[in-house]
Amino acid sequence: MQNTYQDLITDIQSKNPEIAGKLEGGKKFKIKSDFKPAGDQPEAIKKLVQGAKQNEFNQVLLGVTGSGKTFTMAKIIEETNRPALILAPNKTLAAQLYGEMKTFFPDNAVEYFVSYYDYYTPEAYVPRSDTYIEKEASINEQIDRMRHSATRSLLERDDVLIVASVSCIYGLGSVEAYSKMTLTLKKNNDYNREQIIKSLVALQYKRNDQNFYRGTFRARGEYLEIFPSHLEDRAWRLSLFGDKLEKIEEFDPLTGDQVRELKLVKVYANSHYITPKPTIEQAIIKIRKELESTLKKLKAENKLLEAQRLEERTKFDLEMI
């Protein structure tokens, strides 16, 4: 019987119980700026920090354009030292705030989370001509990488500041399921090479020994090289001798030069919508049952064309799953 992804991960984690927990936790927010609070800012910072510590959920900071509201909020985030979410009404303003906060907190995890579609056309049906129009979309790879970086930081760091557009209110699924769909590897521990490769494939990484880019991996002799979904210009190289992981390097994928050595890495899924196999199997059973009952209803109403269209589309989607 073929092992499921969860079987592979459970086997690896059970042999290495010390690899659980946040990799970069415990760091505090620290502003790096020549600016100092002035005018009404010190009083505003004091009151808003006090309100946050007293769990006041609704507070408003008022100020005209150019009065330093962004810097004031940065000081509040620094003093409360809590993970923060900043919502902007659109991508343009979100990008502006992201740039400013990145300047104030260069050593902290300031992340950008907006919709990754350059354009999106939903699926549609034109009854008059019996025409079905497929969904069309173009994904921005850079924004997709930044979204992966944001979700990884939320799970691995305490000093996280996410700047997002209102599109972030749409859920990505279960946090528990996503956090479990990871592969953690530690130097000097024992791993089966083929098991690592199968786990990477289950995490939706593609093997490509020629063209190495984000979301792929390649196997060369005793080396396994992984280009994580959240990194832009860095990748990881695993050096295996037999079943022992002798060395983990972070390297430049263009030059191949080593940047630094690592003791432990955690590989997150290459898709936010990855789903454990048991969940998929349960969903398929429910979809088939619902399809069967709906088809009976449509046929009883003599809606044969609609029934045929629904059956074809549903079976196609099930095959894609």
Image (spheres, rainbow, N blue to C red):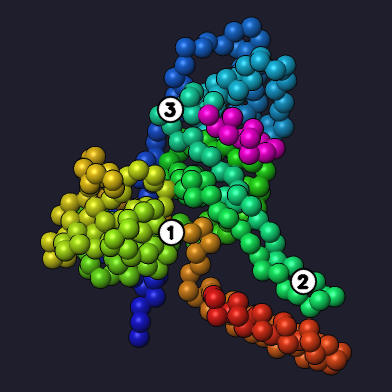
Instruction: Give the class, few, some or many, for how many residues have Cα within 10 Å of label 2's Cα (few <14, many ≥20).
Output: few
227 or 127: nearer the viewer: 127
Please indicate, yes or no, whether residue 90 appears anywhere in the rendered image: yes
Q: Is 151 displayed left or right of 227 in the figure?
A: right
Which secondary structure lies at badge 2? strand
Q: Quadrant of the N terminus?
A: bottom left
| Magenta stretch: includes residue 96 | yes
Which secondary structure lies at badge 3? loop
Q: Residue at x 59, y 44 (%)?
A: 114
Picture layout, residue 119 above or below residue 313:
above
Q: Which residue is mark 1?
A: 269
Instruction: Give the class, few, some or many, for how many residues have Cα within 10 Å of label 1's Cα (few <14, many ≥20).
Output: many
Name the kind of residue labelled 2 in the image: Tyr
Name the kind of residue labelled 1 in the image: Ala
Which tag, 1 or 3, sits closer to the chain's start?
Answer: 3
In the image as oriented, which residue stretches furthest toward the front? 129
220 or 201: nearer the viewer: 220
Residue 76 % position (x, y): 57, 23
Q: Is 158 displayed left or right of 174 in the figure?
A: left
Q: Which residue is mark 2?
A: 125
Q: Which residue is mark 3?
A: 106
117 or 111: nearer the viewer: 117
Mark sitting on residue 11: none
How far apart, in angstroms, are the residues tagged by discs 2 and 3?
A: 49 Å
> What segment carries the magenta color?
88-99
